[in-house]
Structures are given as structure tokens and as C-alpha cells.
Image: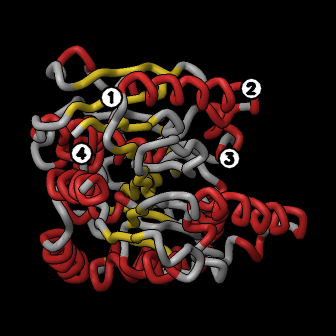
Amino acid sequence: MKLFVNLSSVFKGGAEQVALSFINECRDFRDNHYYVFLSDNLVLQLDTKSFSQNFTFFIIDERPGKSVKSYLKFVNFLNLKEKKLRPDCVLSTSSHGYWKPKATPIVVGFNIPHYVYPESPYFKKLSLAKNIFWFLKKRFHLYFYNRLDAIFVQTEDVRERLRNMINNSIAIHTISNTVNAHYLNPIVFSNKIDSNRVNHYKLLTLSAYYPHKNLEIIASVIKVLIKRNIYQFRFIVTLPSEKFKLLFGDLPDNFITNIGPIPVKECPSLYKECDAMFLPTFLECFSASYAEAMLMKKPIITSNLGFAQNVCKDAAVYFDPCNPEDIIDKMITVYEDEDLQKKMINNGLEIVKKINSAKQRASSILEICDKLIK
């Protein structure tokens, strides 16, 4: 089958990891021809010259959603390519479905938790204007999702919630997220964290910045740690330097270290340098960080919200993401109890066994496309 793989709107975070993983796994499904539309940031992490002849890459140097002009330009470009290349199916691992092909079925991955978890404390922190913005944005995007032929989501909980918002004629499939293949055969890189403070219990938050990730709470936690004379914890984040300075620039560097954004292939090595995974997020459809931490044998300390508990079960300790005192208490609980750490790690390894491999996920996505065509 001939596939258009539209990754033009993917530019950071978990969506970037899913896109890179999927394209790399497609190498093993050689019966297909893949026309891949890549954003320029993905090109930097993908050696396109190493792919076989059944891959054709188109580099999109301007995000389609940047402006009306860039969107219309991209839509016209895709219309011309569809007419010329006549694909059997269009696929996007993460998109809003803004472009609908004229004569080709389209499959899109859904990963906007804001639309399916309205009970999240995130919305209570927003102004009335911002809540109205999200309400209108949801209505706008659901219009486009209702034009699709099939959607895939990452958990059964998200599927059930989305089912109530989407036309019943549109198939919604559950395909669990997974770890990138780099986690199965990790490459050892030189240490990124200085070794001068070896006694610190290092908490890794491997995430791009989004408001719903609630990373700002780390600053509040550090201030309470200082007041309580607790010095054994150290947060490790992966943010652009400008964003890090804005959020944490006035905090002592012995409490927090910024590694900066790193390529996916270097992430397993960074996990090995840390002691636990810390994620104070308000909203997720499925954070790959949970599965990654399980596979890397790290305890998980995260928000006590349904999406986290749905995935992590008893492989995590949960805190109130709005309460620095509760967060610190849970951090101390994990830090002081080695038996609890071992139990969480073992439970995580059992959970991750049941999650799709990267190859299984790619196969399931391609199977949806194949069924649509037939």
C-alpha cells in the first residue's frame, strides 16, 4: 500500500517520540511505500539517507499551523501530491485532521487530553478567558476529528471518553503507547549530570514545556524544601535554557539542574544517571515517560489523577499536584523506603510487559490503514 505519513505538525514532546519511533519501525514493513512529510525538527533526529527506496521524504520547513497563509500553502501542496501520487491511505500519528484528502481515507492519532479530562485541576487554575478559549478550541477541533475515517488513541479510558464526542461512524481504536526502540538497546553516552553531589536523590522530569505539565510546581517544592532544611533531593529537567531561566532562574543550582532538550537516543542514558521519575502533570492521554521509567527500573512519583493511575497502577506513588507539602512527603516516602522502591520497580516491569512494543504499535497502526483500504 502507498501511504502518506503526515508528520508536518509534530515539533516537540511525546508526539515527537511517537513519530520518530513509528517511522523507524516502518523500515521492517517493506511491502509499503511511505511518502513522509516531516517537520524540520524531526529531520535533525532522522537519518533519511539510511532509509530504503520505499521511503520518500518531503521536508516541511514551516509549521502548517503557524499562520493561515502557511496552512493554505501546505494544504495546496498536499492536494497536489495526492493528485500526483495517488496514495491508498493518509496517516498522521498526531494531528487535528485539518487537511482532509479528496479521495483517500485518513487515519489520525488523538492525544489532546484537555478535551477528554475536563475534571483536571488544570482548568481550575485558568482564567475565565482561558477556559472559554479551550471550550472553543475543543469545538473547533472536534469538527475536524468528525471528518476522519478512523482514530487511534492510547488507552481504553480515552477511547470511551472520546467515543461520546465523535460520530459513531468513525472507528476509534486503542493502541497503547510504548517505549522507543532505543530503550531496548540503549546506547551509553557520557554523563550529563555533574558527579560532585553524589548524595542527591535525583528526580528526572524528561519533558518539553507545556502549561498542563505543571512544571512550575517544582519551584514551589524547592522553596518548601529550603524552608524545611531538606537538601537531599535534586530535580533534573530537560528544557530550553530560556524557559528554564524563566521558571527556575532564581533557585539554587544544587536543587535543580537543566540538561536541555536531548535526542531520544540519549534519554535511556540519562535515566540511568537518575534515581526516580518525577512527573507533576495535570493532563495526559498516555505519557511515554511512565513506560520508559518502568523499563529503566525507576520508581515513579506522579500526580494522583485518573490517567496516571490508569497506566501506572501500583508502580507509582501519587501526590496532589497542587500541594508542594504533599509532593515532598511522597518524595520522602519513596526515598526512605528501599523495599517500596523495589516493589514499584518490579510492578512496573510487569506492567510494561503488557504494553505494545514499538514494532507491535507500528503494525497495529498499519493494520488500521490496511482495513480501511479493503
In the rendered structure, which amino acid carries the disc numbered 2?
Lys
Residue denoted by label 1: 35
In the rendered structure, which amino acid carries the disc numbered 3?
Leu
Q: Earlier in the sequence, mark 4 or mark 2?
A: 2
**Position of 298 relative to 69 (above/below):** below
User: Can residue 81 be seen?
Assistant: yes
**Position of 199 relative to 346 (above/below):** above
In the rendered structure, which amino acid carries the disc numbered 4?
Pro
In this rendering, position of residue 307 left or right of residue 352 = right
Q: Is mark 3 on a helix, strand or loop?
A: helix
- What residue is shown at x 33% (from left), y 62% (from top)? 276
Viewer-closest of 91 and 62: 91
Q: What element carries label 2?
A: helix
Quarter placement of the C terminus: bottom left
Whole-angstrom CA distance, mark 3 to mark 1, is 40 Å
Q: In which quarter of the image is residue 181?
A: top left
Residue denoted by label 4: 268
**Position of 78 relative to 350 (above/below):** above
Residue denoted by label 3: 247
